[in-house]
Image (cartoon, helix red, strand yellow):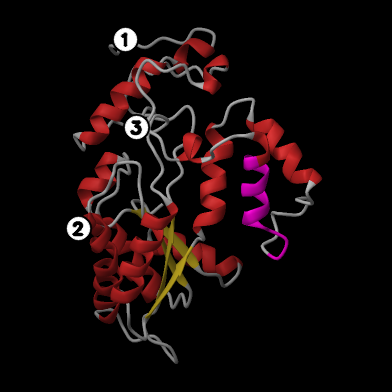
Amino acid sequence: RADNFSLGLMERVQHVRKSGLTFAPEAGTQRLRDAINKNVTEEEILRSCRTAVLRRVEQREALFHAGSAHRDRPRMCWASPSWPRRYTRRGRSAPPTPKRGVTITVSTACFVPKPHTAFQWEAQVSMEEYRRRVKLLRDNMRGRSIRYNWHDPDTSFLEAVFSRGDRRVADVIEEAWRQGAKFDAWSEYFDFDRWMAAFDACGLDPAFYANRVREKDEVLPWSVTSTGVTTPFLWRERERAYQAVITPDCRVQCTGCGADKLYPGGKCDAEA
C-alpha cells in the first residue's frame, strides 16, 4: 500500500528476495482517486516511489484505469502521463541508482463495473473510446525512463458482459464452447470474433450488458444474491463518487453499509 510503505518494510522485503514493486494509484488526479474512494494522496505515492529508488528496486510499476466508471474527462485521462514524469523527477533527487536510472512501467486497464459495488449501474466505455484514450496516453508518455503497457479492450469488454450478464449469457458461453472456445484464458487461443458469433447465434447484443447505464429502479440480475451491503448504501456511494467525497475506512468508522447484520452481535449506529 502506497500510504504506509516505509524504508524499513522495503528492507525486509528485499531481505527475502530481490523483487519489483507495483503501486496502484488507479487515477491520475486526486479528485478521481477521491471519487473511487482510493484514500491515498499523490505525495504518499511519490514518497513510496522514492523509497523504492533508495533501495535500488529496479522494476517499478504503476497501475491506472483509462476509462473509469466515473466518466473521467479528458483532462483526468491526460493526468496519467504527467504522473510518471513527476515520479522520475522525484527519483532523481535520490542517490543515483547503479547501472540503471530511474525507470517505471505504467500500465492501464479498461475499468470494468462490477456487481455489488457503487459502480454496478455504470456503463463501461466503448472499446473504441478506450483505444482512443490508450493512443492519447501512448503518444504523450514517451521517454527512455518510461514504458507503457495497456490491457486489450476485447477481453475487458467480455469481462464486463460476463460480470453483469443475466441467465441468457449462459447460452452464449455454451455456444462459444461448441464453436471451439475452450482455452481462451490463454491469449493465443482467444478469438474475439468467435465470441461475437456466439452472441449473434443467441440473438443477444453484448453492448446491452457492458455499455449501458442501469437505472436506479432496474432489477439487476445479481439482486438474487446478497453480500450484506444494502442497495441504498451502494447508491449513496455512487452519488458520493460524483461529488468526489471520501467514505471513511470501515475499520475506523462504521458507514452503515448493512454488512454488520451478517455477524452475530453486529451493531452499527451509523445512519444507513
Q: Nearer the viewer, mark 3 or mark 2?
A: 2
Residue at mark 3 to residue at mark 1: CA–CA distance:
15 Å
255 to the left or right of 193: left
**Place of residue 39 in the rendered image (x, y in percent of width and height, measured from the top left):** 30, 43
Q: Is residue 217 left or right of residue 193?
A: left
Q: Which residue is mark 1?
A: 269
Toward the viewer: 65 or 12? 65
User: What mark, if any, has residue 75 been given in the picture?
Assistant: 2
User: Residue placed at 63% from the left, 55% from the top?
Assistant: 193
Give the residue type at disc 2: Arg
Disc nearer the start of the sequence (3/2): 2
Choose the circle earlier in sequence order: 3 or 1: 3
- In the picture, the disc for residue 249 is 3
Q: Residue at x 57, y 73 (%)?
A: 18
- Decide whether the magenta segment is chiefly helix, strand or loop: helix
- The residue drawn where x is 53% and y is 69% is 14
Q: Give the residue type that dot 3 points to.
A: Asp
Residue bounds of the magenta highlight: 188-200
Report if the CB atoms under discs 2 and 1 are less than 8 Å apart: no
> How far apart, in angstroms, are the residues tagged by discs 3 and 2?
28 Å
Q: Disc 2 and disc 1: Cα gap in Å?
A: 40 Å
Nearer to us in this view, 64 or 5: 64
Local packing at callout 2 (Cα closer than 10 Å; few below 14, some 14-19, many 20+) is: few
View extreme (bottom): residue? 99
Q: Position of residue 247 (x, y in %)?
A: 28, 31
The answer to whether marks 3 and 2 mark residues whose Cβ atoms lie closer than 8 Å is no
Element at label 3: loop
Q: Which percent across, then down, holds residue 245?
A: 21, 34
Q: Is residue 99 magenta?
A: no
Determine which quarter of the picture holds residue 8: bottom left
